[in-house]
């Protein structure tokens, strides 16, 4: 089996995972307001998941005889929660797409297929999670509006 095409897509994936480490960390750092209590940890957790995947993919690239990249793509950051959730959903969706493509190229190496499928499942969980969080974004903002109104009445 020729692993060159697999190594190439794994390096694209690695670059994406490094982007995730930086993007999720940055969004964790800059998120302010009451929802920081929830989302700073959530985004940091996702940064750690990206780092875990980067480790797995980097080690696998070397095992297959390749050289891992140490670069990343541009990150997308925002202080607006809904925007960050959208960026996150797009990030996770792209990961699902890339691992699916890698799986097609890994056909013929059963262990590699299982290895990639395991990560693909986690990426899909990310898509499911951010899809659900985005559905609740408007409701979360409404709570903020109600709190502001009550403050006005007291004042
Ligand atoms: Fe990942």
Image (spheres, rainbow, N blue to C red):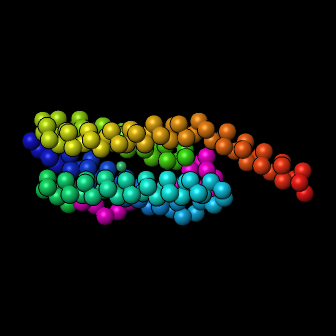
User: Which residue shows up at 61% across the image and 38% down it?
Assistant: 136
Magenta span = 68-84
The residue sitting at 39% across, 58% down in the picture is 48
Q: Is residue 73 magenta?
A: yes
- At horizontal 49% and vertical 53% (from top left) the residue drawn is 42
Q: Residue 85 appears at what percent x and percent y?
A: 55, 46
Say whether residue 102 is visible.
Answer: no
In this rendered view, identify the residue nearer to me: 31 or 146: 146
- State the image coordinates of residue 94 (x, y, percent, origin top left): 41, 43
41 magenta-colored: no
Quarter of the figure that contains the C terminus: bottom right
> Image quadrant for the N terminus?
top left
Is residue 68 or residue 149 the one in the foreground?
A: 149
Farthest left residue in view: 1
Residue 34, image x and y in percent?
66, 56
107 sits to left or right of 100: left
Give the image quarter of residue 92.
Answer: top left
Direction from residue 28 to residue 34 in the image, left or right: right
Residue 14 position within the rendered picture, expressed as x and y whole percent measured from the top left? 31, 54
- Look at the magenta stretch and give its main secondary structure: loop
From this viewpoint, is residue 42 visible?
A: yes
Residue under the point 27% across and 47% down: 9
């Amino acid at each position: 089996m020729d692993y060159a095409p697999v190594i190439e897509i794994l390096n694209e994936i690695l670059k994406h995972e490094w982007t995730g480490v930086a993007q999720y960390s940055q969004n964790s750092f800059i998120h302010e307001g009451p929802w920081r209590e929830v989302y700073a940890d959530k985004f940091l957790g996702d940064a750690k998941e990206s780092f875990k995947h980067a480790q797995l993919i980097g080690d696998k690239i070397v095992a297959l005889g390749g050289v891992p990249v140490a670069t990343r793509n541009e990150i997308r950051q925002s202080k607006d929660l809904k925007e960050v959730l959208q960026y996150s959903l797009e990030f996770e969706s792209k990961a699902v797409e890339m691992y699916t493509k890698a799986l097609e190229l890994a056909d013929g190496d059963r262990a590699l297929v299982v290895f990639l499928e395991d990560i693909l499942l986690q990426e899909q969980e990310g898509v499911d999670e951010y899809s659900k969080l985005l559905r609740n974004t408007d409701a979360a903002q409404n709570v903020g509006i109600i709190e502001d109104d009550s403050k006005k009445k007291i004042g």
